[in-house]
Image (tube, rainbow, N blue to C red):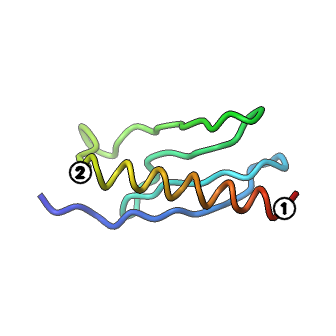
Amino acid sequence: MEYQKTTVVISQKDTADLIAELWCGEHCLGEISLENQITKLRIYPPPKNAWHLELDEFIAFLMQAKKELLEKVSANS
């Protein structure tokens, strides 16, 4: 199975809070946010039956997204 490119987009919700959008190809698979000093992950349903991701790459992807979000939040403080 060929995996699609994953990307992180730091954006701002309706409120002042920043989020890290997690994209897999053309589909948003979720977002990471910082709420009350707790990092939270919201996962969206897949476009088909299930997400098929390589575990180690996915964990590294999540850690990179968290790092980028925390850096951006720190820079905006």
Up/down of 77 relative to 43, above or below:
below
Question: For this view, does 1 lie left or right of residue 59?
Answer: left
The earlier-in-sequence mark between 1 and 2 is 2
Please name the residue shown 53% across and 56% down the image. 65
Numbered marks: total? 2
Q: Disc 1 versus disc 2: distance between alpha carbons?
A: 33 Å
Please provide percent x and percent y for residue 13: 74, 50
Mark 2 neighbour class, 10 Å CA radius: few under 14, some 14 to 19, many 20 or more: few
Q: Residue 18: image x %, image y %?
A: 73, 52
What residue did someone put label 1 on? 76
- Residue 42 vertical placement versus 8 (above, below): above
| Residue matched to label 2 | 54
Which structural element holds mark 2? Answer: loop
Image quadrant containing the C terminus: bottom right
Name the kind of residue labelled 2 in the image. Glu
Q: Amino acid at mark 1?
A: Asn
Q: Nearer the viewer, residue 22 or 38?
A: 38
Q: Residue at x 76, y 56 (%)?
A: 73
- Disc 1: CA contacts within 10 A as few (<14), some (14-19) or many (>=20): few
Q: Nearer the viewer, residue 74 or 10?
A: 74
Tag 1's secondary structure?
Answer: helix
Q: Residue at x 23, y 46 (%)?
A: 52
